[in-house]
Amino acid sequence: MKIIVDAMGGDNAPGEIVKGAVRAQRELGVEIVLVGRKEDVEACLKAENATDIPVIDAREVITMEDDPSTATRRKKDASMTVGLNQLRDGAADAMVSAGSTGALLTGATLIVKRIRGIRRAALAPVLPAGEHGVMLIDCGANVECTPEYLLQFAYMGSFYAKKVMGCPEPRVGLLNVGTEDTKGGSLQHETFVLLKQADAEGRIRFIGNVEGTGVFTGGVDVVVTDGFTGNVLLKATEGVIKYMMKSLKGVFYASLPNKLAAAVLKKDLKKMAKSMDVNEVGGTALVGISKPVIKAHGSSNAASIFAAIRQAKIFVESGIIADITENIEYMKLKTENDG
């Protein structure tokens, strides 16, 4: 299996990106191809004693200041653009980038293309909750959504949760302001009916509306929502985790007895912190694109890049793109023109 890694994307490129990629090739049994400014990337590879990893030269870099809607079209020789073109042309099985989220999503849509019949690709991070985590789909790619978009997100999220996250029978919930069937606006009402029908046909396991508090209580595996609401939930979750860990640290260092308690609980505290660490998750899948693309966190270190590559490997092996393709007719709303 060959995985392309954008060596110039992210705050810590290319050093941490290369370190994570080298580790992935050594430990995961995958073949890595790095894309970026050749001299810079090769210098990092030399430092890691890994000169056997090929580098595709790309002279430009897409930055956070670039317009994400036009970046890959204007910067044809950017590492992200070159990598996406390589993926499209079959030179690799998947791609990982810690670069601009908007540019990667737009570039993947325009260059690699969506799965035929999928209306919109979605950003689908896995939140640290429950045994397998909870997929949030969408978290920012599509601010304005239709019921059909959310229906497709539910199917795609269900396939991903089963094949990649390891949930044997994923429970799909619709994010809403209450759990009652009548809650929400027209988008939620219409989507609820579609998901209920898909559940009745045995195609997904829809458990109904889910409130924000219900996302983290272990009763749902896939949370479906529009990109605006999903992004607010995601950012709020990240903020709460940071605040909680900072506050917890303050408590344990407040006094000598507390420090002694911290020493006793050190192992368990590290385990809890690890479960909430973005570096352990790896990245966010761009679900709906015709080939696996993983968006690693912009501040990714080597451990995070390694985890993102591992995620890409599982994505490729899962076969969910074939699952989506085979079920596309159930994921589209019938129109008068469809007969």
Image (cartoon, rainbow, N blue to C red):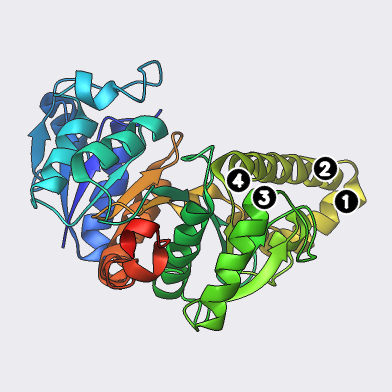
Check disc 2 and give the amino acid type: Tyr
**Between residues 242 and 68, which one lies in front from this camera angle?**
68
Residue at the (75%, 39%) spot, across then down: 243
Please report contact status of discs 1 and 2: CB closer than 8 Å, yes or no: yes
Please indicate, yes or no, whether residue 283 appears anywhere in the rendered image.
Answer: no
Marks 3 and 2, how far apart in space?
50 Å
| Of labels 1 and 4, the one closer to you | 4
Q: Is residue 333 above or below residue 255?
A: below
| Of labels 4 and 3, the one closer to you | 3
Check disc 3 and give the amino acid type: Ser
List the residue tagged with mark 1. Answer: 258
Marks 1 and 4, how far apart in space?
37 Å
Residue at the (40%, 21%) spot, across then down: 64
Q: Position of residue 113 (x, y in %)?
A: 23, 46
Lower sequence index among marks 3 and 2 = 3
Residue 186 shows which numbered tag? 3
Lower sequence index among marks 4 and 3 = 3
Structural crowding at the residue carrying mark 2, measured as other residues with C-alpha within 10 Å and reported as few (<14), some (14–19) or many (≥20): some
Q: Is residue 239 left or right of residue 277?
A: right
Residue 87 shows which numbered tag? none
Residue placed furthest toward the top = 65
Residue at the (18%, 26%) spot, across then down: 40
**Between residues 168 and 18, which one lies in front from this camera angle?**
168
Structural crowding at the residue carrying mark 4, measured as other residues with C-alpha within 10 Å and reported as few (<14), some (14–19) or many (≥20): many
List the residue tagged with mark 2. Answer: 253
Lower sequence index among marks 1 and 4 = 4
Q: Position of residue 34 (x, y in %)?
A: 17, 41
The quadrant of the picture occupied by the C terminus is bottom left
Check disc 1 and give the amino acid type: Asn
